[in-house]
Amino acid sequence: MQWRERVALTAREMEELDAELHHQILTLWQTAMLRLNKLRVMDEIENGLAYYRYTFFEQLPRLYAELEDRLRAAGVLAAGAELPGFLTMGSWIGADRDGNPYVTAEVLRTASDRHARLAFGHLLDEVHRLGAELSLSSRLVAVSAELAALAKRAQDRSPFRRDEPYRQALIGVYARLAATARARADLAPAREPHAQAPPYAGADELLADLDVIRDSLLANGSADLANRRLRRLRRAVRVFGFHLAALDMRQSANVHEAVVAELLARAGTHPDYAQAPEAERIALLARELASPRPLASPHLAYSEQTRSELDILTVAAGVHRRFGGAALPNYVISQCNAVSDLLEVAVLLKEAGLMRPGSPPQIALNIVPLFETIDDLRHCGRIMNEALEHPAYRGLVAARDGLQEVMLGYSDSNKDGGYLASNWALNVAQRELVEVFSHHGVRLCLFHGRGGTIGRGGGPTYEAILAQPKGSVTGAIRVTEQGETIASKYSDPELGRRSLEALVAATIEASLLEEPAPGGRRAEFRDAMEQLAEHARRAYRELVYETPGFSDYFRAATPITEIAELNIGSRPASRKPSRRIEELRAIPWVFSWGQCRVLLPGWFGFGAAVERFLAEDRGGLALLKAMYREWLFFRTVLDNMEMVLAKADLGVASRYAALVKDEALRERVFRRIRAEYELTVAHLRAITGHAALLETNPGLARSIRDRTPYLDPLNHLQIELLRRYRQGQTDELTQRGIHLTINGLAAGLRNSG
């Protein structure tokens, strides 16, 4: 399609191109959309790595080069100077154990190996290609003494290259890189080196050799050659190293508690750590962190869970030895709600040699608390203040260059309190964290756990970053890309670069530009938002958690049960075998509401909140209009909600509600959903001044309108198939039909979760 748009083709070439397009479409048409087997974690690792081949290997170095060129042209960056590494990749596929029993020590080892092999493969290919390009002859150009020495060390005996010092040097570089790949990743290079050479001790040594080549080219009239493939290769070494991307480990705080409790009990240190009060826990953990004595013993037997956790930490230590700390720099604690949760991880890291007591202590990973629920977000400032006041934990932060990362959960806070309450709790939490860290003089990096849907923190990335509270983006931010948004943003190189550019641009602007209004009305706006969020939270929780039979309604009126059977991921749909909404993961929760066209997590509670707010304050509508006009945070929240409402269709949703056999329950719940939808749309239009949804975004409105004729038949087909399936027609074709409609609706709705 790109060739067809951009290149002037002859008539014959156009015919061939059209024939190729037909071939591609026919192939897709006859390719099955459904997997026959459930994905394994290994499969997810491979799927994630594909985007490096599609986009990141090529576009990340290009982005750096383009930005450097623009800054030089603007007189900001000196000639010859280069930007430090500011944009890097991370992943937790293969290292995230939270609720995923299939992530084991062996899986973590495989993930790090696959990362390294892909990185080495790319670097080896690029060095080989560079050697093919740099055919410069010493009879025509001079070279630096350092380049001549590098070429000599290669011991290239080919008579055909004796006057080609750059090629000789790169043959030596290739040989050393190949030896490194064998030693560290057990990777046999696609092309055998011409000679044996010692491996590199680290990526910095490879970069130093490439710098010798660059400096010689720059000094001898070949700057243009230095600024092409070599420049991108040098940047790739700095961005990807030998490890490719940072793997984040993650586990739940209650697992850490259980493991530490067992270790302490088996060591005779404390008989019942789990029942100890928080102050006693902190004191005990601090003593353990100061002691060089390990808790675990090879002569004692432990539970399967404890053994598994110790094994995975042993593998993590091995990853550090082979690929360095950048390969596995973070340990995320989900469901973190106390200082002891942080110290428990430090104690476990000590068992693997990844934390060493002393003055000062040493620790090889960042300990990253994840605050997920509304309640967790409300208390995160207090928890981090207590942690930074404690000498034991403050010493660990100092050992990580005085930088503390904190992760904020969008999905579970939304599932806990609804859309408006979640967004406000996240905003307040960030402001509190900024104040706490400023008080303690510790650098803060916020890690935003955003999903693809609006209900999970999704939406345009650029606007989302700019809408963050002042001081929360100070040159550093981490964001997640999850689900189908990865493919939609990064499977095409050009779209991938635009997505990366948006991240960089927003981070620079949010860090350097002054926050726009609300200016003098800031306190008034925040007070109003506090009231709205609390009203919305109550309305949401009354429906979802306090309405008798709501879980039964949800499971009958959405395809949640059938979604759980899809082979779309390795993680179970629920944390525990239970029908309770509390145990259901946020992803299938949001995904289910999208399928039945309600999209409840992206809007429910707003209408009731505004209705209550206006009843308490007759001048409230003018205030809400001013908030939308002057406050970027509020405007972003409402604009994202408007998009969700435009995709919802309560007429279609009523057909799904008919699947609920209990008529009284059906009427009670769906009547409330419909009333809240109508109230939300009415109040949203009154605040924004829009006569229709998406009035100011006609392109998106047209896109949604154009997709509706394809979506509606899929919904009606899905409803009929669900009815038949639940009545006992459970043959393979019926199941396949349901799963195909699920896939089709997800593709048509987009950002579905």
Image (cartoon, rainbow, N blue to C red):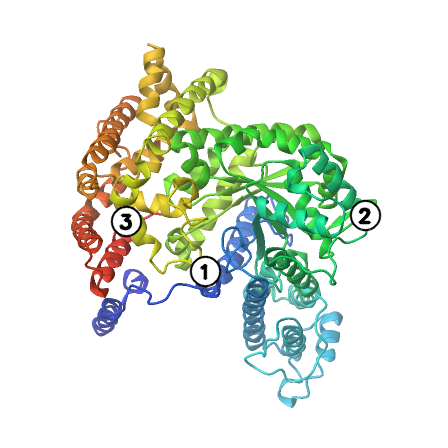
Q: Which residue is mark 2?
A: 291
Q: Quarter of the image holding residue 227?
A: bottom right
Marks 3 and 2: in contact by CB < 8 Å?
Answer: no
Q: Quarter of the image holding residue 162?
A: bottom right
Q: Residues within 10 Å of mark 1 (few under 14, many from 20)?
A: some
Q: Which residue is mark 3?
A: 559
Question: Is the residue 175 above or below the residue 572 in the image?
Answer: below
As measured in the structure, the alpha-carbon distance from the residue carrying label 2 to the one carrying label 1 is: 47 Å
Question: Is the residue 493 above or below the residue 696 in the image?
Answer: below
Nearer the observer, 722 or 92: 722
Residue at horizontal 31%, vertical 51%? 561
Nearer the observer, 128 or 124: 124
Residue at horizontal 64%, vertical 29%? 436
Which disc number belongs to residue 243? none
Mark 2 is on which residue type? Answer: Ser
* Eye-nearest disc, 1 or 3: 3
Q: Earlier in the sequence, mark 2 or mark 1?
A: 1
For the image, the number of numbered tags is 3
Does the image show residue 354?
no
SS at mark 2 in the image:
loop
Q: Residues within 10 Å of mark 2 (few under 14, many from 20)?
A: some
Mark 1 is on which residue type? Answer: Thr
Q: Earlier in the sequence, mark 1 or mark 3?
A: 1
Marks 3 and 1: in contact by CB < 8 Å?
Answer: no
Q: Position of residue 293 (x, y in %)?
A: 80, 52
As measured in the structure, the alpha-carbon distance from the residue carrying label 1 to the one carrying label 3 is: 34 Å
SS at mark 3 in the image:
loop
Does the image show residue 464?
yes
Q: Quarter of the image holding residue 464?
A: top left
